[in-house]
Image: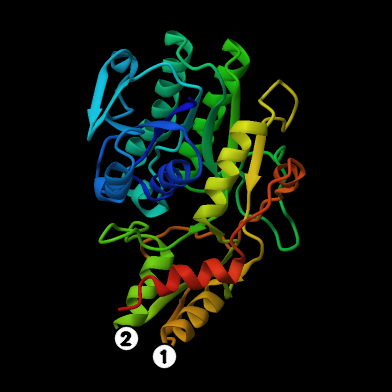
Amino acid sequence: MTRILLTGAAGFICSNLCRYLLRRTDWEIVALDRLDPAGALSRLADCFRDFPDRIAMVHHDLRAAVSDYVGLELVTGGGKFKAAPFDYVAHLAAGSHVERAQKDPIGFLHDNVLGTAHILDFVRMREVVTGKTLVFSTDETVGPAPVGVAYGPNARQFPRNLYAASKAGGEMVAMAYAETFGIPTIITRCTNVIGPQGPGNAPGQHDEKFPVILCRKLLAGETVQIHTVGGVPCSRFYVHVRNVCGAVVHLLKSGECINGEDGVGIYHIAGEREISNVEFVEYAAKTLGVEPRFEFVERPPNRLKPDLRYCLNDADLRALGWVPEVGFYEGLAETVRSYAP
């Protein structure tokens, strides 16, 4: 039986990963989360209800070491588990918002640098992981891409905000642990993620995320702010959360680990096409049957120096045989429609 430790399990992306694994594989999951405002246990309610013998929960804040949890028996629903050993670790726990990072940069460094170090030290010291450890990161670590440029895995890091800097620090920690201690490690960088609200009354993405903001403002008849750089609206490559989940599982099975060669062991998970935030608002308004209302803001008070665009080249991931299962507009429509009354 394959067993995996998932960190950040009550967050939007990782709760979808839990659901993906439970429905499509026979793997057992130990789900770790500190259950702060970004991590809602209700996102996992259907997982505990439908698969009580295959998922267990550890309540833990990764700003503290995790070694004390080895050997504990964890009981959730009808299942009983020991916390170790594991075949894989997927580390998705993170602070993940630019504006909150501006308000609490030290907290983000604790979460994304120290938290990554603690999970890797758990792998190193306890010798309870037999396979790969995947560290989930962001396109923002390599910074904004000029028009026509898509950064590959060996791109230099150029974080332009405190969130990106903290994630870049986490990547550096992961690379150093891999090289120093021989931990089989993969790093993924991902473009912006979209996806529907959770089953039942479970929340989807955090309220601070742009897809949530624009859908709720449009439904309320309010105006959506569009950030611009030099008068040009910002754009993003949105990737559906099920495509992200499929890519993570594919890489755990087939990805090459960091081995000292530039870019090896780093994989990009990217959306299929670029869409400006204006296009997104107009598409969402049409899908919801409401009037598109937006205004351009060159210097938003809540975000210092917004980046115009990020763009990643995911050729290395696709070369392993991964293909996205959810098309771009299919994923966009599913996301938007989940907010319709």
Regarding residue 116, the answer to whether it shows in the image is yes
Left or right? Give the position of 12 relative to 127: left
Color theme of the render:
rainbow
* Residue 283, percent from left and from top: 52, 80
The mark that comes first in sequence, 2 or 1, is 2
- Front residue of 130 and 271: 130
Regarding residue 229, the answer to whether it shows in the image is no
Q: Which mark is residue 184?
A: none
Q: Quadrant of residue 179?
A: top right
Is label 2 in contact with label 1 (beta carbons under 8 Å)?
A: yes
* Residue 262, percent from left and from top: 74, 29
Residue 109 vs 148, above or below: the answer is: above
Q: Which residue is mark 1?
A: 291
Q: Which mark is residue 221?
A: 2
Q: Quadrant of residue 128?
A: top left
SS class, disc 2:
loop
Residue at x 52%, y 33% (from the top left corner):
135
Type of amino acid under label 1: Glu
C-alpha gap between disc 2 and disc 1: 8 Å
* Residue 317, percent from left and from top: 70, 43
The quadrant of the rendering that contains the C terminus is bottom left
Neighbour class for label 1 at 10 Å: few (<14), some, many (≥20)?
some
Residue 304 vs 294, above or below: the answer is: above
Residue at x 56%, y 70% (from the top left corner):
330
Neighbour class for label 2 at 10 Å: few (<14), some, many (≥20)?
few
Type of amino acid under label 2: Gly
Residue at x 71%, y 50% (from the top left corner):
313
Left or right? Give the position of 76 relative to 274: left
Left or right? Give the position of 119 relative to 199: right
